[in-house]
């Protein structure tokens, strides 16, 4: 399980260092794709397979779901971290997520998210305000 937030910089070659606590789970490789809210999702091979199966189970008759599948897979790449724990972020994915220099790498349970640090601060500020309301709503639904 991936937890915590870590600030790193993207080097001139478009690489970012993975937090040391994430490296063992990503050492054999990872899959990177576009996430919601203009971040990047990073999956272990096992989590990627689960996500692939989830998407495959969606009905192809729904145009929005077909488009979601296209964006999710067309933007995806597989990477293996180098000896320093860095992964290459292609320009297309960096552009999508607005990643330039400083990024925040966030553990979100089964996946990692990579955010522009300024955008991450905005997202967490809004999330902090809604946190109590969301917890209450989850309780009402028995979650």
Image (cartoon, rainbow, N blue to C red):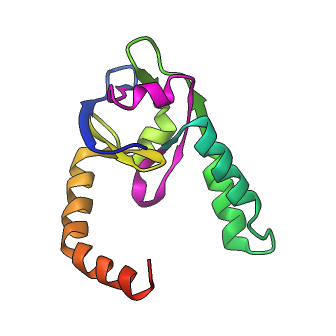
The x and y percentages for residue 42 are 49, 41
| Residue located 74% across and 75% down the image | 62
How many tags in the picture? 0
| Residue located 40% across and 19% down the image | 85
**From the image, which quarter does the C terminus lie in?**
bottom left
Residue situated in front as seen by the camera: 108 or 35? 108
Whether residue 88 can be seen here: no
Taking 102 as reference, is 65 above or below it?
A: below
**Residue 86 highlighted magenta (yes or no):** no
Compared across the picture, whether 99 is left or right of 71 comes to left
Q: Residue furthest right?
A: 61
Residue situated in front as seen by the camera: 11 or 46? 46
Taking 2 as reference, is 54 above or below it?
A: below
Taking 86 as reference, is 115 above or below it?
A: below
Compared across the picture, whether 23 is left or right of 122 comes to right
The x and y percentages for residue 29 are 56, 26
The x and y percentages for residue 19 are 32, 29
The part of the chain drawn in magenta is 17-41
Quarter of the view holding residue 2: top left
Q: Residue furthest front?
A: 142
Q: Residue furthest bottom?
A: 140
Whether residue 27 can be seen here: yes
| Residue located 36% across and 27% down the image | 16
**From the image, which quarter does the N terminus lie in?**
top left
Quarter of the view holding residue 116: top left
Compared across the picture, whether 51 is left or right of 123 comes to right
The x and y percentages for residue 126 are 22, 69
């Amino acid at each position: 399980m991936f937890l915590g937030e870590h600030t790193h910089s993207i080097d001139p070659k478009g690489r970012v260092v993975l937090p040391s606590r994430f490296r063992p789970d990503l050492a054999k490789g990872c899959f990177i794709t576009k996430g919601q809210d203009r971040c990047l999702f990073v999956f272990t091979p096992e989590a990627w397979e689960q996500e692939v199966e989830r998407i495959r189970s969606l009905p192809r008759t729904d145009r929005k779901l077909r488009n979601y599948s296209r964006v999710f897979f067309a933007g995806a790449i597989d990477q293996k971290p180098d000896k320093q724990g860095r992964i290459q972020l292609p320009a297309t994915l960096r552009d999508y997520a607005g990643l330039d220099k400083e990024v925040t790498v966030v553990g979100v349970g089964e996946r990692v998210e990579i955010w522009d640090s300024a955008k991450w601060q905005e997202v967490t500020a809004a999330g902090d305000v809604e946190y109590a309301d969301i917890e209450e709503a989850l309780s009402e639904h028995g979650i």
